[in-house]
Image (spheres, rainbow, N blue to C red):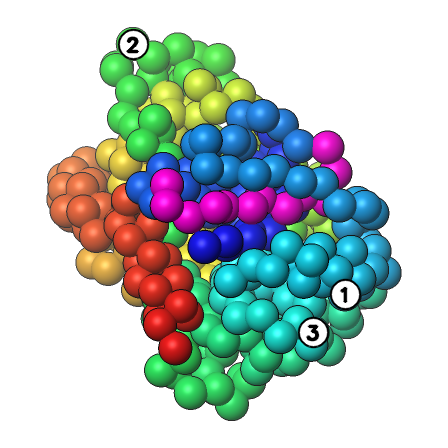
Amino acid sequence: MKIAINTRLLLAGKLEGIGQFTAEIFQRLSQQHPEIEWIFVFDRPYDEEFRFSKGVKMVSLFPPTRHALLWHIWFQFSLKRYLKKEQVDLYISPDGFIPLGLKIPSLAVIHDLNFVHQPKNLPALAGAYMRHFFPMFAKEAKRIATVSEYCRQDIADSYQIDKAKIDLVYNGVNPNLKISPSEEQEKARAKYTNNEPYFIFVGALNPRKNIEGMLAGYQEYRESGGKAHFIFVGEEMLLRPAMKKAFELHPYQADIHFVGRIPFEDLGPLISAAQALCLVSHFEGFGIPILEAFQCETCLITAKNTAMPEIAGSAALYCEAKDHHSIAAAMLRSEDPEARAELIRLGKERLRNFSWDKSADMMWESITKCLAT
């Protein structure tokens, strides 16, 4: 049996959310199921680190998918032609893109519909392409997988698709990211804030992450007597002028640190040493930093909207993403060491529901359903 995977987001040293999802799940499944010929299809030269087992065949098809026009060429012509030639039994797309008219069973992973609900968060052409084609991809796929019950319902409602066709495959969290020894935490605190306490945000700096709202909440927190600094870890992505202005005019600018992408070995100590991790987005289909906070035994501040409550459960200080007073109040509540300790305990319990091993099992169930009929 041949199963082909769209692995174009497996980029060595640059694994973002969907790339991490692809790597973690199909490393496990390719090793657990050697009876299957796994075909990993890339859109540029691939790295051998992604050959997870002897049963993996790796191919690269032209052209590299660097913008929407090239997406169309790669999926509708290069990939479609290759899949037909190889006579694969199933095509899986971890980023949801499907060659239309393929006539081969396909499983599309649609992580969320952010591009529908938050259209300004993507480049105009990319967003327009996705809003036009994803309803077609969703209808043409034999099955759909998604990462939260919130997204499962959202896809069903937005695209008028039977929920029975949509399978739940949660994200996991990197097992190598964990609470760090106290001496490593002290080094991280000394390096980034000169030993001062701090909040931390981890993720791409784009509008849906609510950077402006967190900065406004942080200002009120400081004006209310809070002393912690604020560290933002992540690269810029569609950083609007208003977001830059919010930082440039911030009265506590000296205590706000945009550190960009940092080495993975620094991330565990940096999260572990934080007073709280803040994920107060306008939209999250899952929110992997929630699990990263739990795994590093750090207090979590998150928003009440979209999938965040589903993932965090009772193990978070909740606030309203659009209300900076609410964000400031959550930051102030995180000053209480007893409250933090209880949330950390609850987070460790909540984390038992999520792992990449469980995610791989959920994906295999979805694959089995695709192949059964």
The N terminus lies in quadrant: bottom left
Q: CA distance from mark 2 to mark 3?
A: 54 Å
Q: Mark 1 is on which residue type? A: Gln
In three-dimensional space, the C-alpha distance between marks 2 and 1, rounded to whole angstroms, equals 53 Å
Label 2, on which residue?
Answer: 183
Mark 2 and mark 3 residues within 8 Å of each other at the beta carbon? no
Disc 2 element: helix
Q: Nearer the viewer, residue 93 or 192?
A: 93
* 43 and 120: which is toward the camera: 43
The part of the chain drawn in magenta is: 34-45
Instruction: Report the residue marked by disc 1.
Output: 76
* CB-based contact (under 8 Å), mark 2 and mark 1: no
Separation of residues labelled 1 and 3 (CA atoms): 7 Å
N-terminal-most mark, 2 or 3 = 3
x%, y% of residue 229?
47, 31
The stretch drawn in magenta includes residue 43: yes
The image quarter in which residue 298 lies: top left
